[in-house]
């Protein structure tokens, strides 16, 4: 999958313009890389389009614990969207990410997220 295909699919699933899909994708991958371990972030980065890999690079190894609400807030601020659009966008990114990296890598990374994420992760798995 190319970056263009990834972003287009996110935008379509989230019901947002392509530029917003790009910003939501960036924000989601940045927040995800902060929230999971460096090893898991690298595993995901190895499987996404090259243009998206920098968003999964960890600055620090340990995962930074923060809530579901903070995750959405980070994405919303990065993309300049409201909370509900961010939530819909994060779900879309997770769906496309799962398709791109495969179910095992996706499950390994998502296992590091708190239970609050279960609804979004479940929607990505269907």
Image (cartoon, rainbow, N blue to C red):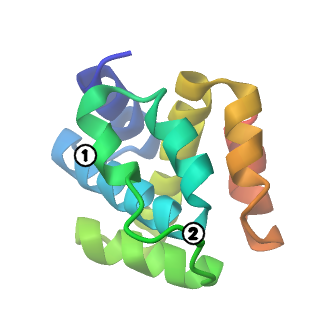
In percent of width and height, residue 48 lies at 42, 29
**Is 72 displayed left or right of 113 in the figure?**
left
Mark 1 crowd level (few <14, some 14–19, many ≥20, 10 Å Cα): many
Label 2 element class: helix
* Mark number, residue 22: 1
From the image, which quarter does the N terminus lie in? top left
Query: Looking at the image, is 78 positioned above or below residue 98?
Result: below
Residue under the image location 57 percent in, 79 percent down: 64
Location of the C terminus by quadrant is top right
Q: Is residue 39 left or right of residue 89?
A: right
Q: In terms of secondary structure, where does tag 1 sit? A: helix
Q: Where does label 2 land, which residue?
A: 35
Foreground: 14 or 68? 68
Q: CA distance from mark 1 to mark 2?
A: 20 Å
Q: Residue 91, can we see it? A: no
Task: Give neighbour class at mark 2: few <14, some 14-19, many 20+ (Cα, 10 Å).
Answer: many
Q: Position of residue 108 (x, y in %)?
A: 75, 44
Q: Earlier in the sequence, mark 1 or mark 2?
A: 1
- Give the vertical position of 26 relative to 47 (above or below): below
Question: Residue 56, position in %: x, y?
Answer: 40, 51
Q: Residue at image x 42%, y 63%?
A: 85
Say which residue appears at 48% left-offset and 44% top-offset: 93
Query: Considering depth in this image, is 97 or 83 the residue closer to the camera?
Result: 97
- x 28%, y 47%: residue: 54
61 or 68, which lies in front?
A: 61
């Amino acid at each position: 999958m190319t970056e263009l295909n990834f972003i287009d699919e996110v935008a379509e699933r989230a019901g947002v313009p392509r530029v917003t899909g790009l910003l939501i994708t960036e924000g989601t991958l940045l927040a995800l890389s902060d929230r999971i371990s460096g090893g898991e972030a690298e595993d995901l980065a190895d499987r996404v389009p090259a243009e998206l890999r920098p968003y999964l690079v960890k600055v620090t190894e340990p995962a930074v614990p923060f809530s579901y609400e903070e995750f959405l807030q980070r994405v919303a601020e990065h993309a300049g969207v409201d909370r509900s659009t961010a939530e819909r966008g994060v779900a879309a990114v997770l769906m496309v990410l799962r398709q791109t990296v495969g179910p095992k890598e996706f499950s390994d990374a998502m296992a590091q997220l708190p239970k609050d994420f279960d609804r979004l992760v479940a929607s990505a798995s269907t």
